[in-house]
Amino acid sequence: MNIKSLMNQMTIEEKIGQLLQIAPFFFIKELDIEVSGHVNTLSMTHQKIFSSGSVLGIGNAEEMIQVQTKYLQENRHKIPLMFMADIIHGYETIFPVPLALSCSWNPGLVKNVARISALEAQTSGIHVTFSPMVDLVRDPRWGRVVESFGEDPYLHEVYAKAMVEGYQNEDIKKVGHIASCVKHFAAYGLSEAGRDYNTVDLSRVSLHNQFLPGYKAAIDAGARLIMTAFNVLDGIPSTVNQYLLRDVLRKTWKFQGVTISDYDSLHQVIAHGCAKDDYEAAYRGISAGLDIEMASLCYVNHLKTIISEGKISCDLLDEAVERVLTLKNDLGLFENPFKGADPNLAKALVRSEKHLDFSRKVAHESMVLLKNDGILPLKQQKVALLGLYATSRETNGPWSWHGKNDLNASLEEALIAAGIQVCYVQRQEDPNQIPKEDYPMIESADVIVIAIGEHTKQSGEAHSRSILEIPFEQDKLIHDAQRFNKPIVTLLYNGRPLILESIQSSNAILETWFSGSMGNHAIADLLNGNINPSGKLTMSFPRNVGQIPIYYNHLNTGRPQVLGVQNEYVSYYLDVSNQPLYPFGYGLSYSNFKYQSIQLSKNQMTKNETLSLEVQITNDSDRGGYEVVQLYLRDVVAYISRPVMELKGFKKIWFSPHETKVVSFDIHHDMLSYRNEYGEDVFEYGTFKAMVGSDSLHVLSTDFDFVKE
Ligand code: BGC
């Protein structure tokens, strides 16, 4: 398709239409998908609807074909609609939520999650997914931490690349490949006090070093779209923020793809107090370089006037429209507007056995064993199963619109299928009460397994919480169950780090998150020992809400607390330690890994050299298992204060029973730079600390100098 000549034939209204994204029900009233916000209250003319450019959300192939057919009948130039949707952690085969995925420390696995999600989603004619979300997070009160890869910039880079490559698979023209829209640009994860949609305020140094690398990695991996965030940055809403959208994105990163607002976020510039009305919002949006507006009508109702009054040149509009049409062309939609939509293929592919098996494997690697005094794995013991999640099938978690929880196995079914002897299952109305008449059955068990957690709707968008103890007082059940004097294994189903002090009396705690279609089967595999846990946390678990924000890669402060040294006037709390309950990188295994003798090839390096760091690790157990070996660096002295440690590499390695391996990492100069407030790379010579360990608290360390050639 020759985009330029197509644009020459388009009226200004038709061009502006390409920048509008609306829901399917505008085209066919019966497709009544939940619509909220401003757009719902405004009527749209027939002409505007049938010149809009893209659709938000679609149920299945039949619906897509219906909408596209009707649209093409009405659209003068037969420009196909582009269909976008939130395919976040699977389409119908649901994988663990992104926070859980990140705990696998396995980018190859996560890439394949995106690949399978794309293969399934394309069967309903979805061309673009609003994923990955690479908003770095530090506050578990924010419900959307469930969609994030946690608190570390390097992990965000690694997973952003993996997901974009998985969705797009190099050539988005091919059937089965979908375009990736990275979000939410920028720093939405820092919503103040963990309250969704709240203000964000941070320094440019933090922005460039901590918050931007994830989005940049997605762009470098070829992500074709980027979504703006709801929040302000430097007081300016991201959706109309020229620094972000022009200076950083277009000028510095050379991004050529499409920018899209978040849901209604262009109109919300008014509520931020940065535009008087939709007219001003439209003016600020197009001036800043926002291409598509999702679910609001600022452009469609005002851009024509803004251009005719000479406030902006028509070139700005043309640039945006050209980017949108180019994306449609690159997706192959002009040749095949129904690309991918195929009910028969959907039947064969969607939720296939192969995909479900893979989802089970991903769930194995995503769960994190937080505590184990030796009770796990179970050894032929009889199990009494208690708690809200004993019989529930709700393992899909938030952002899984196309997934169906009722097709998932309950924990009870999964344990039985795995050959675990279940002698009692709690089934009464109040899940926190153990009925007296059930006591004898529980007494006949060897182990009590208690499955508790959050409700699916307690995390995700608009689901912030200020109290992070286990909800609905489910921890009472654990205390009550102690009357039986049996070992207690607690399984947690949740979407964020919770406060777990009150359940420390459990003999074992397994963080299972919301682990997708095969979650309960995966739990059973870990409990009976068929699979050895290997997941490690990517977000710190605080001891109480007062410690938040808590993250491992913080600055040192001028008065750091030194453990073991008594001093009143240092940075600490009177009533709680500075350390989290479970640190970043933490997770147990049924194996026991011992780290010894860290060694560097030399104790200094220049810009052209690479240092090799070696550490000896032994699996001191009879059980084979994976260990995630983590490399951290610290820039000891620099012009700006640098974090006490930063993840720079990791390796997930298999160890046979009693095997010793020497694991090595290369340290090169790219790992030693930081970014200044302008986003420029800065290298400073001096001493660095290299640390290797099984988590961010337990490391071996050594120093080296970065020197001039
Ligand atoms: C969310 C986005 C999402 C969009 C479309 C918004 O409310 O913030 O993450 O992609 O809706 O569903």
Image (cartoon, helix red, strand yellow):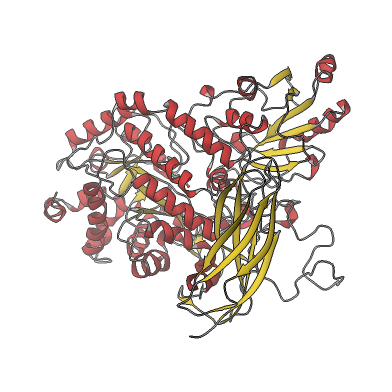
Q: Of all residues shown, which one is farthest toward the bottom?
A: 708
Q: Position of residue 395 (x, y in %)?
A: 57, 31
* Near-viewer residue (657 or 215): 657
Q: Residue at x 57, y 31 (%)?
A: 519
Q: Nearer the viewer, residue 372 or 97?
A: 372
**294 horizontally vs 678: left or right:** left
Q: Is residue 10 something that shows in the picture?
A: yes
Quarter location, residue 477:
top right
Q: Position of residue 242 (x, y in %)?
A: 39, 67
- Residue 38 appears in which quarter of the rendering? top left
In the depicted structure, whether residue 414 falls above or below residue 317: above
In the image: residue 686, left or right of residue 622: left
Please provide percent x and percent y for residue 216: 42, 61
Looking at the image, residue 314 sits to the left or right of residue 298; the answer is: left
296 versus 57 height, above or below = below
Instruction: Point out the quarter of the image occupied by ligand 1.
Output: top left
Q: Is residue 313 above or below residue 361?
A: below
* 377 and 615: which is toward the camera: 615
Decide if residue 94 is in sight here: no
Q: Extreme top residue here?
A: 437
Residue pictured at 81% horizontal, 66% vertical: 563
Left or right: residue 635 compared with residue 220: right
Residues 120 and 76: in front is 120
Q: Can you give x and y, in whole percent of width and height, for residue 611 in the image?
A: 53, 71
Looking at the image, which residue is at 59% across and 64% down? 614
The answer to which quarter of the image holds residue 663 is: bottom right
State how many labels appear: 0
